[in-house]
Image (tube, helix red, strand yellow):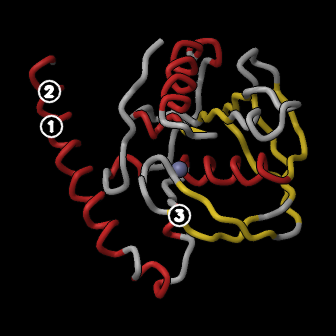
Amino acid sequence: MAVREIVKYGDMNLRKQCGDVEDVFSVSLLVEDMFDTMYEEDGIGLAANQIGEDLHLFVIDISHKDEAEKPRVFINSKIIDKKGECLSVEGCLSIPGIQVELKRSEFITLQYYSLEGEQKKREFNGLLARAIQHEMDHLNGIFIVDRISDLVKMQYKKDLKEIEEDALKESKVREKIQGIVL
Ligand SMILES: [Zn+2]
């Protein structure tokens, strides 16, 4: 178990579509790292590519808001239906300090695999539906700031540029370190 570094906005690895998990049973340690990292950063959701893993996998825990909800793992998910619309404010662990108001579907039907390898299909709503849509966006290379108008985005231009420049520096450092190890 380990807290991993969160990849930030500007790192091109977060712009790729993530590949499917081929062996559900091979990701249990990664899932532990994802929960550790998410809790450390006070997030309620985290996608695998946010800690540098190109896999179609995300975790969510909203139990602090709703005690009936346990921490959940979603593998190779597909949104197969959407209904309604609602507006709410969202932040993102990969874009620290920025929060935007976003429209999302109010109800979604998701098909996914659990960590036990079971295929599931379920309707979600409220905060859970919103968090799922946020994490699914990550796995498709989309950020919350891609979903707001250019006019609204203008007000975050300076902050986004700073985060982007830091992320590019960090990704160059990572490449160098990997070069030495390999
Ligand atoms: Zn995010």
Q: Residue at x 55, y 29 (%)?
A: 39
Q: Quadrant of residue 118?
A: top right
Position in image of residue 112 (x %, y %): 76, 35
Q: Label 1 belongs to which residue?
A: 173
Q: Residues within 10 Å of mark 1 (few under 14, many from 20)?
A: few
Q: Quadrant of residue 122?
A: top right
- Decide if ligand 1 comes within 8 Å of the CB at mark 3: no
Residue flagged by tag 2: what amino acid is it?
Ile
**Mark found first going from the N terminus, 3 or 2:** 3
Secondary structure found at label 2: helix
| Amino acid bearing label 3 | Gln
At x 27%, y 67%, the residue is 161
**How far from the left and from the top, in percent, is residue 158?**
29, 73
Give the residue at the far bottom of this rendering: 151
Which residue is nearer to you in this view: 53 or 95? 95
Where in the figure is residue 24, as x and y percent of width and height?
A: 65, 19
Residue 174: x %, y % from top left: 20, 34
How crowded pointer 2 is (Cα within 10 Å; few <14, some 14-19, many 20+) is rated as few
The answer to whether residue 106 is above or below residue 87 is above
> What is the secondary structure assignment of the residue under circle 3?
strand
Residue assigned mark 3: 99
Which type of secondary structure does the marked residue at label 1 adopt? Answer: helix
Q: Nearer the viewer, mark 1 or mark 3?
A: 3
* Rendered image: mark on residue 177: 2
- Compute the Cα span from label 1 to label 3: 28 Å
